[in-house]
Image (tube, helix red, strand yellow):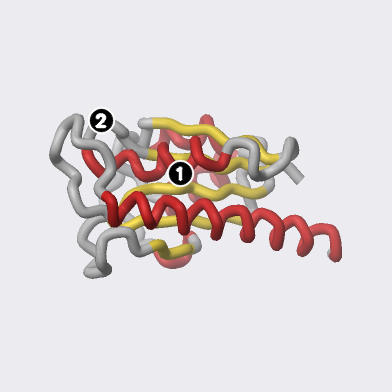
Amino acid sequence: MRTIVLGIGNELIGDDGAGIVTARSLHGHLGQDVDVTETAECGIALLDHLIGYDRAILIDAVFGSGNPPGTVRVLEPCDFSRIEHPSPHYAGIPELIDVAGQLGLAFPKWFRIVAIEAQDRSTIGSGISPSVLRGVREAVSRIVTMVRESSMEVANG
């Protein structure tokens, strides 16, 4: 089973770099059978990173969910609404799954999104806020556990 952990965001813009920082913090914690990578890309461009994997964990900052900054939530594709008029630059998880299916691409069947509530999404060069950095540490711990548990599920059939 091939697994990818993909951190998404822009580390130059405040807390938007939470996914990238989390991915970097995971290096060396997940074993050789898990690829950990990062990207500033979004939308349909994420297909290039996900094709060929059986399992995927995306890590990204979220804004405006009403949760305190640093809150970590683990979501599944069914938790996301479809975008009415997607474009290649702005397509969500459901649209990625649909496109992969329509094109017959080898796309992850097991998919989780680790969302870290951000506080500052506009200050260039400010780094990650302390509350979001605490969320990054929690996300690292939860991802390590998720990878272990999903590996055990596969092994036990």
**With respect to residue 15, does 152 lie above or below?**
below
Q: Are marks 1 and 2 in contact (CB under 8 Å)?
A: no
Residue type, mark 2 in image: Leu
Residue at 24% x, 55% y: name it.
63
On the image, which quarter does residue 9 sit in?
A: top left
Q: Is residue 106 visible?
A: no
Question: Which residue position holds label 2?
Answer: 12
- In this rendering, the count of numbered labels is 2
Image disc number at residue 22: 1
Q: Earlier in the sequence, mark 1 or mark 2?
A: 2
Q: Is residue 118 left or right of residue 113?
A: left
Q: Along the line of sight, which residue is nearer the eye, 50 or 3?
A: 3
Residue at 46% x, 45% y: name it.
96
Residue at 51% x, 40% y: name it.
25
For disc 2, the neighbor class at 10 Å (few under 14, some 14 to 19, many from 20) is some
Q: Position of residue 7 (x, y in %)?
A: 46, 40
